[in-house]
Image: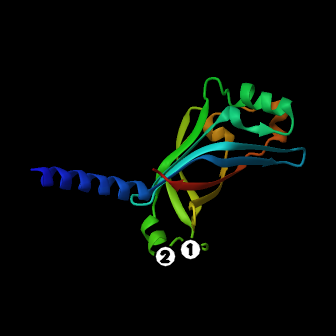
Amino acid sequence: MKNLILTLVLIQTIGQVSFAQDRYFTREGSVSFFSATPIENIEANNEKLQSVVDVSTGAFEFAALIKSFEFEKALMEEHFNENYMESNTHPKANFRGNIENIADLKAKNYPADATAVAKGKMTIHGVEKDVEIPAQLLKDADGIKVICKFNVNPEDYKIAIPNAVRDKIAKDIEVNVEALLKPMK
């Protein structure tokens, strides 16, 4: 009986360890966006992106608190939070989906020239949309590095931009996500 219990505990522990090795996580990723127009360029950075990827299933998520975006000008940051993103009402943006070709990436040991395709739901400003995001997953000595670059149209997420500043904000805003995810323990 003792051996049976010990064996069951060992099997459960091994299962948890192997499961944990397939999941990678960070709270220190970065997300930035850039809006370029002939009138003005707007850039903001957020170094508190949270992300998780499960390489056994392809499940992939990232989330950022809206108030954690930092701008060069304090007034831009204030307008971004209060007037456009309404960050008190919609405090975070996130993506939840799956990396469609995770098995190919794993089989080739995450080559630098391979592009992953993440399909899922992006939620910004309380609006959820189906999206496809191109990404790179690179094996690193410390974990897996994820790099994504995609565009977001503010109108798609019901972000109202007043006519007075419409020409100062790009219709499609470039978003960059970069994170080194380490094995979950």
Residue 50 position, x and y percent, is: 58, 44
At 60% from the left and 28% from the top, the residue drawn is 90
Can residue 162 be seen here? The reply is: no
Along the viewing direction, whichever of 81 and 25 lies nearer the viewer: 25
Specify the label residue 1 is tagged with.
none
Residue neighbourhood size for the residue with mark 1, other residues' Cα within 10 Å, grouped as few (<14), some (14–19), many (≥20): some
Q: What is the three-letter code of the residue carrying label 1? A: Pro
The residue depicted at 23 percent of the width and 50 percent of the height is 9
- Amino acid carrying label 2: it is Lys
Can you name the residue that lies furthest to the right here?
39
The quadrant in which residue 78 appears is top right
What is the crowding at mark 2: few (fewer than 14 residues within 10 Å), some, or many (at least 20)?
few
Q: From the top left corner, tell me how far across and down residue 25 is, in percent.
A: 52, 50
| Residue at the extreme bottom of the image, as rendered | 108
Q: How many marks?
A: 2
In the rendered image, which residue does mark 1 sit on?
A: 111
Using residue 3 as the reference point, say whether residue 152 is left or right of it.
right
Secondary structure under the numbered disc 2 in the rendered image: loop
**Extreme residue in the front direction:** 2
Q: Is residue 116 above or below residue 38?
A: below
How did the renderer colour the structure?
rainbow
> Going 56% across and 41% down the picture, which residue do you hit?
94
Which SS class for mark 1?
Answer: loop
- Quadrant assignment, res 22: bottom left
> Could you say where residue 88 lies in the image, as x and y percent from the top left?
64, 23
- Residue 104, position in %: x, y? 45, 71
Q: Determine contact: label 1, label 2, CB under 8 Å.
A: yes
Identity of the residue drawn at 13% across and 53% down: 4
Q: Could one spot residue 141 in this view of the protein?
A: yes
Give the CA distance from mark 1 to mark 2. Answer: 6 Å
Q: 12 or 118, which is in the foreground?
A: 12
Q: Which residue is mark 2?
A: 108
